[in-house]
Image (tube, helix red, strand yellow):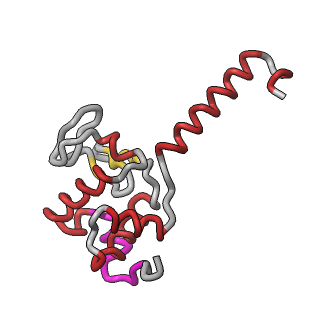
């Protein structure tokens, strides 16, 4: 089929496919149970698992590649929507978690998990607006069957 297309169009299609395949390998949209299992694998306490799942669902929709610019010009990154104002630095290592913010956008969540635990240890779940508005005092996701 590509042989019937002009060379420039065929090249653009091939480049788009390559970019799409690269994007797919670097980001994930996790199911609720995949998320719960990943969090347990990264040593999140089972007793707070429903809170963490709710937090991730409300902050990023379980997407490892979500980034969002905020009105204060900072950006929040990844599953946990870790903010560039204090916790990481765009383009270079830095912040309290001493990491490049872009590292939170791939499907490897070890670094995201470590930083999220640092945030939690300092501020609790209150550090996340999504948890405050959608999880605190509400029915939490059931992950007992995961």
For this view, does 117 lie left or right of residue 63?
left
Please tell me which residue is depicted at 38% across the width and 56% down the height of the picture: 79
Residues 49 and 69: in front is: 49
Please give the count of numbered marks on the rendered protein.
0
Residue 14 sits in which quadrant? top right
Residue situated furthest front in the rendering:
41
- Percent coordinates x, y for residue 35 in the rendering: 43, 65
Query: Could one spot residue 130 in this view of the protein?
Result: no
Q: Which residues are magenta?
A: 128-141
Residue 137 sits in which quadrant? bottom left
Please tell me which residue is depicted at 84% across the width and 28% down the height of the picture: 1
Query: Could one spot residue 71 in this view of the protein?
Result: yes
- Percent coordinates x, y for residue 9 in the rendering: 73, 21
Please tell me which residue is depicted at 42% across the width and 49% down the height of the picture: 107
- Percent coordinates x, y for residue 52 in the rendering: 33, 69
- Percent coordinates x, y for residue 89 in the rendering: 24, 38
71, above or below 17, in the image = below
Say if the magenta span includes residue 93. Answer: no
């Amino acid at each position: 089929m590509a042989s019937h297309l002009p060379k420039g169009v065929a090249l653009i299609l091939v480049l788009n496919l390559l970019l799409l395949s690269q994007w797919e390998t670097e980001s994930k949209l996790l199911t609720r149970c995949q998320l719960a299992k990943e969090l347990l694998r990264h040593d999140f306490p089972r007793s707070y698992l429903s809170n963490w799942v709710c937090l991730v669902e409300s902050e990023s929709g379980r997407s490892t590649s979500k980034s969002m610019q905020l009105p204060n010009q900072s950006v929040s990154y990844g599953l946990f929507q870790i903010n560039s104002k204090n916790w990481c630095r765009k383009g270079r290592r830095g912040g309290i978690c001493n990491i490049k913010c872009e590292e939170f956008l791939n499907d490897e969540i070890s670094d995201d998990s470590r930083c999220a635990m640092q945030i939690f240890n300092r501020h609790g779940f209150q550090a996340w607006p999504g948890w405050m508005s959608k999880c605190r005092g509400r029915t939490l996701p059931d992950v007992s069957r995961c």
